[in-house]
Amino acid sequence: MVVAQPAKPISTPIAVTLTRLVALLEEDATDEYGQLQPTQAAFRRAMQLVVEAYDSMGDRFQKASVSTDDQGGIRMTWNRLDGDGEVRLVCPGQMDQEAYIYHELASEYKVERDVTGVILGQWLEWLNQV
């Protein structure tokens, strides 16, 4: 007789990040501040960019915190452990609005409008190295 062992929870950074993204779909649709669930456009775009970034980075990919804005957009944030820098991916809720990447280190910051998974991966690599 074979006894099935319970599956170990997957806790790789990519698995945690994707689980957090999917969990946004399980939120209440709205609250008094606006939309809680992401729009399908924001969700698809965020998933695509994260998977592409992971494909370019592999095991160097770090987990992100995720949230929605009041318009159904998704904000994903990667922070340095010392709190001195961050990379933020913003996927607006509307299809006609472009995603962007915000990055900062200490008091220097910039917004990147050319967003692909590879470029996101490059900024996440930057965050790992600074």
Image (tube, rainbow, N blue to C red):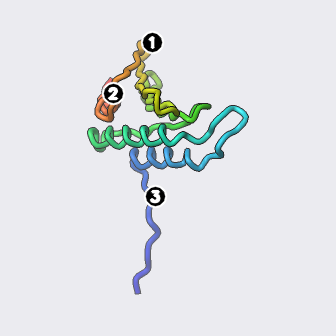
Residue 9's disc number: 3
Residue 78's disc number: none
The amino acid on which the numbered mark 2 sits, given as a three-letter code, is: Trp
Which corner quadrant holds the N terminus? bottom left
Q: How many marks?
A: 3
> Badge 2: how crowded within 10 Å, few (<14), some, or many (20+)?
many
The amino acid on which the numbered mark 1 sits, given as a three-letter code, is: Ser
Name the residue furthest left: 56
Q: Residue at x 62, y 31 (%)?
A: 70
Q: Residue at x 43, y 38 (%)?
A: 46
Is disc 1 placed on a helix, strand or loop? Answer: loop
Q: Position of residue 107 (x, y in %)?
A: 45, 12
Q: Position of residue 61 (x, y in %)?
A: 34, 39
Instruction: Give the side of residue 31 with respect to residue 129, left or right.
Output: right
Q: Which residue is mark 2?
A: 123
Q: Are marks 1 and 2 in contact (CB under 8 Å)?
A: no
Residue 107's disc number: 1
Is disc 3 placed on a helix, strand or loop? Answer: loop
Against 89, residue 51 (above or below) is below
Choose the circle earlier in sequence order: 3 or 2. Answer: 3
Q: Residue at x 40, y 82 (%)?
A: 2
Is disc 2 placed on a helix, strand or loop? Answer: helix
Q: Position of residue 12 (x, y in %)?
A: 39, 49
Name the residue furthest front: 96
